[in-house]
Image: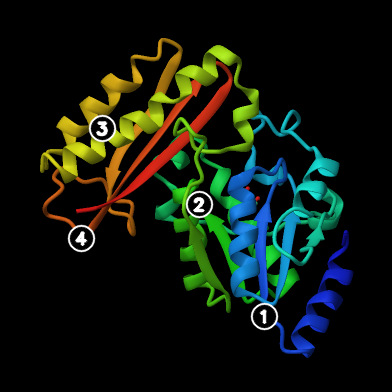
Protein backbone atom coordinates (compact mmCIF):
# COMPACT_ATOMS: atom_id res chain seq x y z
CA UNK A 1 0.00 0.00 0.00
CA UNK A 2 1.35 3.43 -0.98
CA UNK A 3 0.44 6.49 1.06
CA UNK A 4 2.56 9.31 -0.38
CA UNK A 5 2.75 10.99 -3.77
CA UNK A 6 6.54 10.69 -3.72
CA UNK A 7 6.42 6.88 -3.43
CA UNK A 8 3.56 6.72 -5.95
CA UNK A 9 5.65 8.61 -8.51
CA UNK A 10 8.54 6.21 -7.93
CA UNK A 11 6.22 3.19 -8.39
CA UNK A 12 4.80 4.74 -11.57
CA UNK A 13 8.30 5.41 -12.99
CA UNK A 14 9.28 1.80 -12.30
CA UNK A 15 6.23 0.53 -14.21
CA UNK A 16 6.87 2.80 -17.19
CA UNK A 17 10.62 1.98 -17.20
CA UNK A 18 9.76 -1.65 -17.98
CA UNK A 19 7.14 -0.66 -20.58
CA UNK A 20 4.07 -1.31 -18.44
CA UNK A 21 0.80 0.50 -19.11
CA UNK A 22 -0.76 1.75 -15.89
CA UNK A 23 -4.53 1.58 -15.33
CA UNK A 24 -5.94 3.76 -12.55
CA UNK A 25 -9.22 3.11 -10.76
CA UNK A 26 -10.02 6.17 -8.63
CA UNK A 27 -12.36 5.36 -5.73
CA UNK A 28 -13.46 6.68 -2.36
CA UNK A 29 -13.36 3.16 -0.93
CA UNK A 30 -16.32 1.26 0.54
CA UNK A 31 -15.77 -0.96 -2.46
CA UNK A 32 -18.53 -3.04 -4.03
CA UNK A 33 -18.88 -5.13 -7.18
CA UNK A 34 -19.19 -1.97 -9.30
CA UNK A 35 -15.67 -0.91 -8.25
CA UNK A 36 -14.38 -4.45 -8.64
CA UNK A 37 -15.67 -4.50 -12.24
CA UNK A 38 -13.52 -1.41 -12.90
CA UNK A 39 -10.49 -3.11 -11.34
CA UNK A 40 -11.19 -6.15 -13.44
CA UNK A 41 -11.42 -4.04 -16.62
CA UNK A 42 -8.11 -2.36 -15.72
CA UNK A 43 -6.46 -5.72 -15.14
CA UNK A 44 -7.71 -6.99 -18.50
CA UNK A 45 -6.31 -4.14 -20.54
CA UNK A 46 -3.33 -2.80 -18.56
CA UNK A 47 -0.09 -4.29 -17.24
CA UNK A 48 -0.22 -2.61 -13.83
CA UNK A 49 -3.39 -1.62 -11.95
CA UNK A 50 -3.54 1.11 -9.34
CA UNK A 51 -6.60 1.62 -7.13
CA UNK A 52 -6.78 4.88 -5.23
CA UNK A 53 -8.86 5.04 -2.07
CA UNK A 54 -9.43 8.58 -0.85
CA UNK A 55 -12.58 10.15 0.55
CA UNK A 56 -12.14 13.53 -1.07
CA UNK A 57 -13.35 16.33 1.25
CA UNK A 58 -13.53 18.98 -1.49
CA UNK A 59 -16.34 17.23 -3.33
CA UNK A 60 -18.64 17.23 -0.28
CA UNK A 61 -20.62 20.33 0.74
CA UNK A 62 -20.66 21.12 4.47
CA UNK A 63 -24.19 19.66 4.81
CA UNK A 64 -23.24 16.38 3.10
CA UNK A 65 -21.98 13.05 4.39
CA UNK A 66 -18.17 13.50 4.35
CA UNK A 67 -17.77 12.59 8.02
CA UNK A 68 -20.10 9.61 7.98
CA UNK A 69 -18.96 8.34 4.56
CA UNK A 70 -18.00 4.65 5.12
CA UNK A 71 -14.25 3.96 5.38
CA UNK A 72 -13.91 0.15 5.73
CA UNK A 73 -10.26 0.12 4.60
CA UNK A 74 -9.40 -3.38 5.83
CA UNK A 75 -12.38 -4.87 4.06
CA UNK A 76 -11.56 -2.91 0.89
CA UNK A 77 -7.99 -4.26 0.87
CA UNK A 78 -9.33 -7.76 1.40
CA UNK A 79 -11.79 -7.39 -1.49
CA UNK A 80 -9.01 -6.22 -3.79
CA UNK A 81 -7.23 -9.52 -3.13
CA UNK A 82 -10.16 -11.34 -4.68
CA UNK A 83 -10.06 -9.70 -8.16
CA UNK A 84 -7.99 -11.09 -10.99
CA UNK A 85 -4.71 -12.88 -10.69
CA UNK A 86 -2.44 -10.01 -9.76
CA UNK A 87 -2.94 -7.87 -6.69
CA UNK A 88 -3.49 -4.23 -7.72
CA UNK A 89 -1.26 -1.56 -6.14
CA UNK A 90 -3.29 0.59 -3.76
CA UNK A 91 -2.81 4.30 -3.08
CA UNK A 92 -4.32 5.47 0.20
CA UNK A 93 -3.19 9.03 0.94
CA UNK A 94 -4.43 11.07 3.88
CA UNK A 95 -6.06 14.47 3.49
CA UNK A 96 -2.82 16.39 4.22
CA UNK A 97 -1.01 14.47 1.49
CA UNK A 98 -3.53 15.53 -1.16
CA UNK A 99 -4.34 18.94 0.31
CA UNK A 100 -1.28 20.17 2.23
CA UNK A 101 -1.59 23.37 4.28
CA UNK A 102 -1.80 26.34 1.92
CA UNK A 103 -3.36 24.33 -0.93
CA UNK A 104 -5.05 27.04 -2.98
CA UNK A 105 -5.72 26.04 -6.61
CA UNK A 106 -8.82 24.22 -7.78
CA UNK A 107 -10.14 23.16 -11.16
CA UNK A 108 -13.15 25.25 -12.06
CA UNK A 109 -15.47 23.21 -14.30
CA UNK A 110 -17.79 25.15 -16.61
CA UNK A 111 -21.13 24.47 -18.23
CA UNK A 112 -21.03 20.65 -18.17
CA UNK A 113 -21.01 20.74 -14.36
CA UNK A 114 -23.97 23.06 -13.98
CA UNK A 115 -27.20 21.11 -14.62
CA UNK A 116 -28.54 18.10 -12.69
CA UNK A 117 -26.04 17.16 -9.94
CA UNK A 118 -24.44 20.59 -10.24
CA UNK A 119 -27.70 22.34 -9.45
CA UNK A 120 -28.16 20.32 -6.26
CA UNK A 121 -24.43 20.14 -5.41
CA UNK A 122 -22.90 23.36 -6.81
CA UNK A 123 -19.32 22.81 -5.56
CA UNK A 124 -19.20 19.05 -6.12
CA UNK A 125 -17.66 18.80 -9.58
CA UNK A 126 -14.89 21.33 -8.93
CA UNK A 127 -13.84 19.07 -6.06
CA UNK A 128 -14.08 15.95 -8.22
CA UNK A 129 -12.11 17.50 -11.10
CA UNK A 130 -9.42 18.80 -8.74
CA UNK A 131 -8.79 15.46 -7.05
CA UNK A 132 -9.05 13.47 -10.27
CA UNK A 133 -6.49 15.72 -11.96
CA UNK A 134 -4.17 15.37 -8.96
CA UNK A 135 -4.56 11.57 -9.08
CA UNK A 136 -3.90 11.51 -12.83
CA UNK A 137 -0.75 13.62 -12.42
CA UNK A 138 0.56 11.83 -9.33
CA UNK A 139 0.01 8.35 -10.77
CA UNK A 140 1.12 9.02 -14.34
CA UNK A 141 -1.58 6.54 -15.33
CA UNK A 142 -2.10 5.79 -19.01
CA UNK A 143 -5.76 4.82 -18.65
CA UNK A 144 -8.38 5.62 -16.00
CA UNK A 145 -11.55 3.61 -15.39
CA UNK A 146 -14.83 5.17 -14.28
CA UNK A 147 -18.33 3.76 -13.80
CA UNK A 148 -21.23 4.93 -15.94
CA UNK A 149 -23.26 5.19 -12.74
CA UNK A 150 -21.80 8.69 -12.17
CA UNK A 151 -22.68 9.78 -15.69
CA UNK A 152 -22.19 13.52 -15.25
CA UNK A 153 -18.90 12.91 -13.43
CA UNK A 154 -17.65 11.04 -16.51
CA UNK A 155 -18.66 14.00 -18.71
CA UNK A 156 -16.80 16.38 -16.39
CA UNK A 157 -13.67 14.22 -16.36
CA UNK A 158 -13.70 13.84 -20.15
CA UNK A 159 -14.06 17.61 -20.59
CA UNK A 160 -11.22 18.32 -18.18
CA UNK A 161 -8.98 15.80 -19.94
CA UNK A 162 -9.80 17.36 -23.32
CA UNK A 163 -9.45 20.99 -22.22
CA UNK A 164 -6.21 20.44 -20.26
CA UNK A 165 -4.73 18.00 -22.83
CA UNK A 166 -4.18 15.45 -20.07
CA UNK A 167 -2.43 12.46 -21.68
CA UNK A 168 -4.74 9.77 -20.36
CA UNK A 169 -7.41 7.53 -21.87
CA UNK A 170 -10.79 7.40 -20.13
CA UNK A 171 -12.66 4.09 -20.12
CA UNK A 172 -16.26 3.97 -18.93
CA UNK A 173 -17.64 0.67 -17.61
CA UNK A 174 -21.32 -0.33 -17.38
CA UNK A 175 -23.36 0.13 -14.22
CA UNK A 176 -23.32 -2.95 -12.00
CA UNK A 177 -26.71 -3.66 -10.45
CA UNK A 178 -28.12 -5.69 -7.58
CA UNK A 179 -30.31 -8.62 -8.70
CA UNK A 180 -33.45 -6.45 -8.35
CA UNK A 181 -31.93 -3.70 -10.51
CA UNK A 182 -30.73 -1.18 -7.90
CA UNK A 183 -27.48 0.38 -9.12
CA UNK A 184 -24.63 -0.53 -6.77
CA UNK A 185 -23.40 2.39 -4.69
CA UNK A 186 -21.36 2.79 -1.52
CA UNK A 187 -24.27 4.87 -0.21
CA UNK A 188 -26.77 1.97 -0.51
CA UNK A 189 -25.51 0.80 2.86
CA UNK A 190 -27.21 3.83 4.47
CA UNK A 191 -30.64 2.50 3.44
CA UNK A 192 -32.96 0.91 5.98
CA UNK A 193 -34.67 -2.33 4.89
CA UNK A 194 -37.85 -0.41 4.01
CA UNK A 195 -35.94 2.23 2.05
CA UNK A 196 -33.91 -0.44 0.26
CA UNK A 197 -37.16 -2.02 -0.96
CA UNK A 198 -38.42 1.31 -2.28
CA UNK A 199 -35.09 2.17 -3.95
CA UNK A 200 -35.79 -0.32 -6.73
CA UNK A 201 -38.29 2.12 -8.30
CA UNK A 202 -35.41 4.09 -9.80
CA UNK A 203 -34.17 1.33 -12.09
CA UNK A 204 -37.75 0.18 -12.70
CA UNK A 205 -38.70 3.64 -13.91
CA UNK A 206 -35.70 3.66 -16.27
CA UNK A 207 -36.72 0.31 -17.74
CA UNK A 208 -40.27 1.56 -18.28
CA UNK A 209 -38.91 4.68 -19.99
CA UNK A 210 -36.58 2.62 -22.16
CA UNK A 211 -39.49 0.44 -23.32
CA UNK A 212 -41.55 3.57 -24.11
CA UNK A 213 -38.73 4.93 -26.28
CA UNK A 214 -37.46 1.75 -27.92
CA UNK A 215 -40.62 -0.33 -28.27
CA UNK A 216 -43.46 2.19 -28.30
CA UNK A 217 -41.41 4.85 -30.16
CA UNK A 218 -42.74 7.62 -27.92
CA UNK A 219 -40.68 10.70 -28.69
CA UNK A 220 -42.15 13.34 -26.38
CA UNK A 221 -39.64 13.72 -23.54
CA UNK A 222 -42.26 15.26 -21.24
CA UNK A 223 -44.54 12.22 -21.61
CA UNK A 224 -41.62 9.94 -20.70
CA UNK A 225 -40.55 12.13 -17.80
CA UNK A 226 -44.10 12.11 -16.41
CA UNK A 227 -44.20 8.30 -16.55
CA UNK A 228 -40.85 8.06 -14.73
CA UNK A 229 -42.12 10.48 -12.07
CA UNK A 230 -45.30 8.45 -11.61
CA UNK A 231 -43.31 5.24 -11.16
CA UNK A 232 -40.87 6.80 -8.66
CA UNK A 233 -43.79 8.27 -6.72
CA UNK A 234 -45.08 4.76 -6.03
CA UNK A 235 -42.32 4.70 -3.38
CA UNK A 236 -43.85 6.79 -0.58
CA UNK A 237 -40.57 8.02 0.92
CA UNK A 238 -38.77 8.93 -2.30
CA UNK A 239 -38.34 12.65 -3.08
CA UNK A 240 -37.30 13.34 -6.66
CA UNK A 241 -34.43 15.79 -7.26
CA UNK A 242 -34.51 15.65 -11.04
CA UNK A 243 -35.54 13.54 -14.01
CA UNK A 244 -33.74 14.57 -17.20
CA UNK A 245 -33.62 13.29 -20.74
CA UNK A 246 -30.51 14.64 -22.35
CA UNK A 247 -27.87 14.46 -25.04
CA UNK A 248 -25.19 12.14 -23.57
CA UNK A 249 -22.31 14.32 -24.74
CA UNK A 250 -23.45 17.87 -24.03
CA UNK A 251 -25.99 17.00 -21.30
CA UNK A 252 -28.35 19.40 -22.98
CA UNK A 253 -31.98 18.53 -22.14
CA UNK A 254 -34.16 17.30 -24.97
CA UNK A 255 -37.80 17.96 -25.64
CA UNK A 256 -38.13 15.29 -28.32
CA UNK A 257 -36.20 12.07 -28.77
CA UNK A 258 -36.15 11.81 -32.55
CA UNK A 259 -34.25 15.01 -33.25
CA UNK A 260 -31.21 13.71 -31.47
CA UNK A 261 -28.13 11.62 -32.01
CA UNK A 262 -28.25 7.79 -31.96
CA UNK A 263 -28.22 7.76 -28.16
CA UNK A 264 -29.93 9.66 -25.37
CA UNK A 265 -29.39 9.45 -21.63
CA UNK A 266 -32.00 9.52 -18.89
CA UNK A 267 -30.63 10.78 -15.59
CA UNK A 268 -32.48 10.62 -12.31
CA UNK A 269 -31.70 11.56 -8.73
CA UNK A 270 -33.85 11.17 -5.65
CA UNK A 271 -33.56 11.44 -1.93
CA UNK A 272 -34.86 8.77 0.43
CA UNK A 273 -34.49 9.63 4.09
CA UNK A 274 -31.03 11.16 4.32
CA UNK A 275 -29.65 9.16 1.38
CA UNK A 276 -29.31 10.54 -2.11
CA UNK A 277 -29.49 8.01 -4.96
CA UNK A 278 -28.69 8.53 -8.63
CA UNK A 279 -29.18 6.29 -11.64
CA UNK A 280 -29.13 6.63 -15.41
CA UNK A 281 -29.77 4.73 -18.62
CA UNK A 282 -28.05 5.25 -21.94
CA UNK A 283 -30.55 4.37 -24.65
CA UNK A 284 -29.75 3.61 -28.26
CA UNK A 285 -32.58 4.97 -30.39
O1 LIG B 1 -16.61 8.41 -8.09
C1 LIG B 1 -15.94 8.55 -7.05
O2 LIG B 1 -15.82 7.66 -6.22
C2 LIG B 1 -15.24 9.87 -6.80
O3 LIG B 1 -16.00 10.95 -7.24
C3 LIG B 1 -13.82 9.93 -7.39
C4 LIG B 1 -13.84 9.83 -8.90
C5 LIG B 1 -12.98 8.80 -6.80
C6 LIG B 1 -13.16 11.25 -7.02
O4 LIG B 1 -13.07 11.41 -5.65
**Which one is closest to the eye, mark 2 or mark 4?**
4
- Depth check: 45 or 249 in front? 45
Which residue position is annotated with label 2? 153
- Per the image, label 1 sits on a secondary structure element best described as loop
State the count of labels. Answer: 4
Report crowding for label 2: few under 14, some 14 to 19, many 20 or more residues within 10 A (C-alpha): many
Give neighbour class at mark 4: few <14, some 14-19, many 20+ (Cα, 10 Å): few
Disc 2 to disc 4, C-alpha distance: 21 Å
Q: Is residue 67 left or right of residue 111?
A: right
Residue tagged by mark 3? 208
**Residue at 88% of width from left, 71% of height from top?**
6
Whether residue 106 is visible to the viewer of this picture, yes or no, is no
Which SS class for mark 3? helix
Q: In this view, does 263 lie to the left or right of 21?
A: left
Q: Is label 1 in contact with label 3 (beta carbons under 8 Å)? A: no
Mark 4 or 3, closer to the camera: 3
- What residue is drawn where x is 50% and y is 40%? 177
Q: Is mark 2 within 8 Å of ligand 1?
A: yes
Q: Does label 3 or label 2 sit earlier along the sequence?
A: 2
Amino acid sequence: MITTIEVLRRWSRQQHDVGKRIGLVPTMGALHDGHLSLVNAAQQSCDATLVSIFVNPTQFAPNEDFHRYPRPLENDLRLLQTVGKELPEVFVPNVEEMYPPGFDVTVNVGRISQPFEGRVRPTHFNGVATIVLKLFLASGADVAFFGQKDFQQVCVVRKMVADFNVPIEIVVCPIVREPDGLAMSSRNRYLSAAQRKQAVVLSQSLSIAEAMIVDEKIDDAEVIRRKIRKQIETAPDMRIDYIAIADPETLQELTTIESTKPEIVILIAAQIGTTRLIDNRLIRI
